[in-house]
Amino acid sequence: MKQGVFMKKKISYIVYQVSQRKWGIQRTGSQIPSLFFSSRFNAWAEARRLARGKGAVAVFKDTDGKVKVRNNYNDKE
C-alpha cells in the first residue's frame, strides 16, 4: 500500500431482532443499535434507505442471527 493512502472502511447497516417485538438497525463499528422499530419490515426499509444514501451495504439477519439478505448499494463493486 502506498504511503498516505488509507482504505475506507465499508459501512453496513445491520437489521436484527433486539427483543420479541423490537427490531434494531446497527451501523458497522457501533456497539448498540441506533434505531428501533416495532416491525422488521419498517426496520429493513429504513436500513435499505440509509445504505442507498451512503453507498453502503444493508444486511438483514433472521431471528437466529443468520444473514438472510444482503443488499450492496456501492456502485464501485
Image (tube, grey):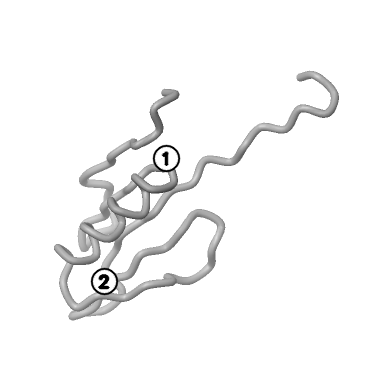
| Image spot of residue 64 (x, y percent) | 24, 59
- The quarter of the picture where the C terminus appears is top left
Q: Which residue is mark 1?
A: 55
Residue at x-position 42% and y-position 70%:
33
Residue at x-position 43% and y-position 71%:
34
| Image spot of residue 58 (x, y percent) | 33, 47
Give the residue at the far right of this rendering. Answer: 3
Q: Label 1 is placed on what type of residue?
A: Gly
Q: Which residue is mark 2?
A: 23
Q: Label 2 is placed on what type of residue?
A: Trp
Measured along the vertical axis of the image, is residue 31 above or below residue 56? below
Q: Nearer the viewer, mark 1 or mark 2?
A: 1
Measured along the vertical axis of the image, is residue 2 above or below residue 22? above
Measured along the vertical axis of the image, is residue 61 above or below residue 23? above
Q: How many other residues sit within 10 Å of disc 2, few (<14), some (14-19) or many (≥20)?
A: many
Circle 2: element type = strand
Cβ–Cβ under 8 Å for marks 1 and 2: no
Count of numbered circles on the image:
2
Q: How far apart in space, not on screen, are marks 1 and 2 (Cα)?
A: 22 Å
Give the residue at the far front of this rendering. Answer: 53
- The quarter of the picture where the N terminus appears is top right
Quadrant of the rendered image containing residue 42: bottom left
- N-term-proximal mark, 1 vs 2: 2
Residue at x-position 28% and y-position 39%:
71
In the picture provided, is 35 more to the left or to the right than 21?
A: right
Residue at x-position 33% and y-position 36%:
72
| Image spot of residue 36 (x, y percent) | 31, 75
Residue 72, numbered label: none
Foreground residue among 31 and 11: 11
Foreground residue among 23 and 48: 48
